[in-house]
Amino acid sequence: MVILLPGTDGTGVFFQGLVEALKAFCEIKVLSYPQHGDQSYEHLGRHLLSELPTDRDYILVGESFGGPLAIWLATHATVKPVKLILGATFAASPFSLPGRWIAPLVPLARFIPLREWQIKFMLFNGGHAQWAAQIFEHTRFIDRRVLLSRVQSVLRCDMRAALSALPIPVLCLNATQDRLLPPWLPRHFPQQSHIRIVDLPLPHMIFQCAPDTIAENQILPFLMST
C-alpha cells in the first residue's frame, strides 16, 4: 500500500494524476488533514496514526508540507512503513533560525489577498494554468488561518534527528526549479547511506507537473527495489 500525504492545502484532491499513474501497480490511500484546530505536526500526526495500516506493508509519501509529517508518522507508527518518499519538501525548515523569528508574524498574512497568478508563478513557474486555477478555486474556501498555521509549523519544524534514526530506505525528490523553496535553501536531509536524493528539473508541484514520469522513473523502481 502507498499512503499519500498532501501539501499545505491538506485535502489530497490534487493527487489525482499520481493516483492514476500508480493505481495499476499498488493500492493507494490518500490522507487529509483536519481543517480546524491545532495544525502542528505532532497534533496532525497523532490525528492520522489510526489511519496507518497494522496488517500489511506500506510506504509513506509526503509532499511539501506533508514531508515532515511523513517523517513524524514513520517515527511514531505502531507498525513502521517499509519505505519513505519525500517530494519537494524538507526535514527541517529551509528558513532555519530566521524562519522561527518570522513565524509569530505569519498570521498577519491573512490580510494579504491570495491571487491565482501568485499560485501559477510560485508553484508552477508560470505554467500549468489549469492546475493553478484548480488549486486557487479549491484553497480559497479553506480558512486562511488554518493555512497560515501550517506555514508556522513549517517555519518551526525540525525532523532531522527523527529522519536520521529511521532504519528504512528514504527517497528524496528535490525540485531544482522550485520558486517557493528555491534550491539554494537547505532541505536538511542527512547524508546517510539509506537516504537517496534525486534532483528533478521541475517546479514545486512535482507530483502535479509530471506524475507519470515520476511514477515510472522514480516511485515504482523505488517501491520494487530491495
Image (cartoon, rainbow, N blue to C red):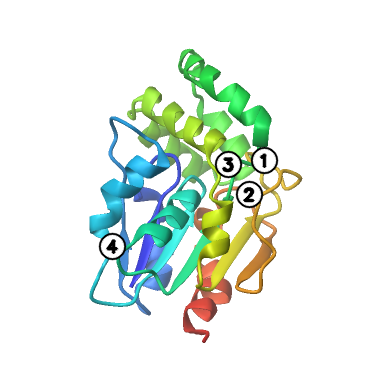
Check disc 4 and report the residue beneath it: 52
**Can residue 160 be seen at all in this image of the molecule?**
yes
Say whether residue 61 is left or right of residue 174.
left
Circle 2 crowding by C-alpha within 10 Å: few under 14, some 14–19, many from 20: many
> What is the distance, in whole Å, between disc 1 and disc 2 at their CAs?
7 Å
> What is the distance, in whole Å, between disc 4 and disc 3 at their CAs?
29 Å
Using the image as rendered, state which of residue 201 and residue 89 is in the foreground.
89
Using the image as rendered, state which of residue 135 and residue 2 is in the foreground.
2
Name the residue: 39% across, 70% down.
81
Using the image as rendered, state which of residue 115 and residue 37 is in the foreground.
37
Which numbered disc flags the more N-terminal residue, 4 or 1? 4
Q: Nearer the viewer, mark 2 or mark 4?
A: 4
Q: Are marks 1 and 2 in contact (CB under 8 Å)?
A: yes
Name the residue: 35% across, 77% down.
26
Q: Give coordinates of residue 200: x percent, y percent.
A: 67, 61
> What is the distance, in whole Å, between disc 4 and disc 1 at their CAs?
32 Å
Q: Secondary structure at mark 4?
A: loop
Which numbered disc flags the more N-terminal residue, 2 or 3? 3
Circle 3 crowding by C-alpha within 10 Å: few under 14, some 14–19, many from 20: many
Return the mark for residue 179: 1
Q: Are marks 3 and 1 in contact (CB under 8 Å)?
A: yes
Return the mark for residue 203: 2
Q: Give the vertical position of 11 relative to 109 (above or below).
A: below
